[in-house]
Amino acid sequence: MPASTFPLDEDRISRLAGAPLADVRVNWPLIEGALESRGMRDPLVKVAAIATVSVETARTFRPIDEFGDEEYFTRMYENRADLGNTRKGDGARYHGRGYIQLTGRANYRGYGQKLGFPLEQKPELAKTPEVAAAVLADYFKTRAVDESAVARDWETARRKVNGGLNGWEPFRVLVQSLERELGIGEAARPARRGPRALTLTSPYMKGPDVVRVQRALAVPDDGEYGPVTAGAAAAWKRRSGYPDDQVDNTLSPQDQRYLLGKDTLPTPFRNRGERRARELAQTAGVPQLAVAEMEQWVGLQERPKGSNKVPALGRVAAELGLSDWYQKMGWPWCAFTVFLAALKVGGQSAEAGLRQGKFNALYCPTILGEAQAGRWGMRVMAASQAARGDLVLFDWSPQGDPADHIGRLVRPPAAGIVATVDGNSGDESLSVVLRERPTSQVRAYVRDS
């Protein structure tokens, strides 16, 4: 392979990333070689790789095991059919390894077959530098992380790897340091002229224009366009009659004129909004009805014990005409339970997610992302506005997925405690239970309809 033309050597990478020089010298040539062998030679792609490896490996700059022990891996990944973990012990055996935490039997099998390594038979190989570099580079190419990097869309690049924005701040800071070292500065970005579009970014957009729309949306006017404001914007668009493909969490300059009353909404928008209001009235109270339904399920037992199947909930799913696919996965997954309850009482988000399969309503990070975008009748709520029946997304640790678990609020959070009713919880003989946890573990409160 030709000598690298990337201007940053291992010494400078080590200094900028705060990583041990010896580890950078061993690992960076393998990573760079794997990228270039797949046609990814642009310096910005290598910036993305350096920042990703630094953050994902806690600055060790070497392949690592996911943080946790066997009990943690079993709790998080055992019986996860979405990961291909269908055999006893798969949760711990196929825990996260490498530069970007390859996880699950199905992923070990898939990457092993694609790259020519016996990863399913020998999962520990995923932690060797050669294999970890190949997995990282292949992931960058197949998920188009390289395209986001070349476009300098760093938030999207981070989301494609992490599934969210965990580790965003150190990632962003390192990217900026690497860009400066390469002579790529803010001057390369086009100057902003006139009113700006407001959208959910990280870090959040700030300014007096944010305050103005927050006051119009009746949300806390802290001046930061965060998930609560973004969710309220999407809800306003739906109420105002925007076409379905325009209902998102972005407020263009024209959207802001409509919101602030400077321009009148088009007649088709108003007519559509009135029709939606009538339809919404027919399903009012879905969160409250859903949590009451789940409270009736408290104490349901797995049968046989340890099978992750609850026959009573299986019957509910069958009565509602859900696909056999859910039964094959086993239940109650935490997300399956909360949406099954909503579907039973007429919920719309459950209808789209479970019956139509239009989004992965069984994967907590996807639920969080869809709610932040204001889709499928879901939006993020401020803690002060959270009410009985709202969804609660929990995050157990700062590493890994941005959300690990979901339940429904039994009562509004108070005194640092959030009380929920959850599926896939409790001890090994119970699957639907009432739980209390500290509010520090809450990632988001979400209202569905």
Image (spheres, helix red, strand yellow):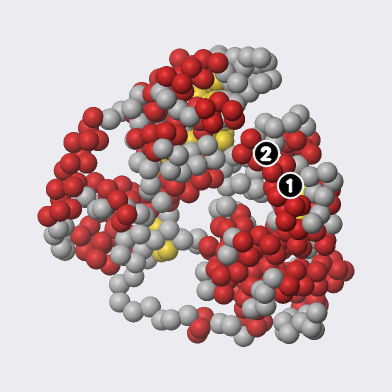
Residue of label 2: 84
Place of residue 130 in the rendered image (x, y in percent of width and height, measured from the top left): 82, 62
Q: Earlier in the sequence, mark 2 or mark 1?
A: 2
Residue 62 seen in the figure? yes
Q: In which quarter of the image is residue 78?
A: top right
Which residue is painted at 67% across and 78% down in the image?
41
Element on which disc 1 rests: helix
Which residue is painted at 67% across and 74% down in the image?
39
Which residue is painted at 15% across and 53% down in the image?
268
| Image height of 144 relative to 333, above or below | below
Q: Are marks 2 and 1 in contact (CB under 8 Å)?
A: yes
Amino acid type, callout 1: Arg
Element on which disc 2 rests: loop
Q: How crowded is mark 1: few (under 14 residues within 10 Å), some or many (20 or more)?
A: some
Which residue is painted at 63% across and 65% down in the image?
141
> Which of the pair 420/31 is nearer the observer?
31
| Image height of 381 relative to 177, above or below | above
Question: Along the horizontal axis of the image, is 304 left or right of 205?
Answer: right
Residue of label 1: 109
Place of residue 320 in the rendered image (x, y in percent of width and height, measured from the top left): 41, 23
Image quadrant where one finds the C terminus: top left
> Which of the pair 19/367 is nearer the observer?
367
Place of residue 275 in the rendered image (x, y in percent of width and height, measured from the top left): 17, 41
Q: Quadrant of residue 355?
A: top left
Q: Residues within 10 Å of mark 2 (few under 14, many from 20)?
A: many
Question: Along the horizontal axis of the image, is 273 left or right of 211?
Answer: left
